[in-house]
Amino acid sequence: MIEDKKPDNVVFNRETKKYDAALRPYATSVGAPVITTTDTIAWKNRSINKINHRLEAKYVELKAEYEKMIQEFEYNKLIFSAKFTFEPIIGEVYHLYKRENGESFLSIIAPEQCNFNSLGSFYLNTNQIWEKI
């Protein structure tokens, strides 16, 4: 059986036996609008640049928070390993000193009132975490 030959300007799908010019992803006639691909490289580069800056800022923020937490840990470790013969009260300021033999001790006496080797003044907050003043 001889197939009915369609002209070149007619879009006919031989498999489905239907006219499907409207379903094609490309122009099918001379009068159809020009299909151009959009340039997404500039958009991608801007997006990548924005994401990189955002992630770098977040990294710097997390790194600073981590360093602060490590420093807080070190201060608390130092104070809890120091010698003191009283129970510290939450909300009060205490002073950490170092003796000549290297032993550290906690005191209520301010550095201006004595001549001990001061390591710093600390505040005991409500979470029982020592904060350097």
Image (cartoon, grey):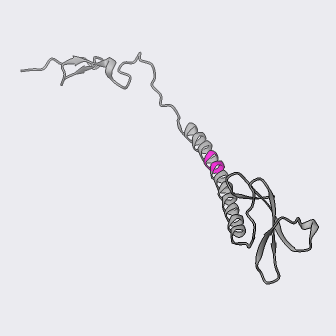
* Residue 48 image offset from top left, x and y in percent: 57, 44
Question: Quick check: 109 above or below 98?
Answer: above
Residue found farthest to the front? 86
| Quadrant assignment for the C terminus | bottom right
Report if residue 10 lies within the magenta region: no
Q: How many marks?
A: 0
Q: Residue at x 75, y 66 (%)?
A: 86
Boundaries of the magenta span:
54-58
Closest to the observer, 29 or 97: 97
Main SS, magenta residues: helix
Q: Is residue 77 left or right of residue 48?
A: right
Q: Is residue 85 left or right of residue 50?
A: right
Q: Is residue 127 visible?
A: yes
Q: Quadrant of residue 121?
A: bottom right
Residue found farthest to the left? 1
Q: Quadrant of residue 69?
A: bottom right
| Quadrant assignment for the N terminus | top left
Q: Is residue 120 left or right of residue 50?
A: right
* Residue 84 image offset from top left, x and y in percent: 75, 70
Q: Is residue 6 visible?
A: no
Residue found farthest to the bottom? 101
Question: Quick check: 29 above or below 71?
Answer: above
Question: Quick check: 23 above or below 100?
Answer: above
* Residue 49 image offset from top left, x and y in percent: 61, 44
Q: Residue at x 45, y 25 (%)?
A: 35
* Residue 43 image offset from top left, x and y in percent: 57, 37
Q: Residue at x 70, y 61 (%)?
A: 72
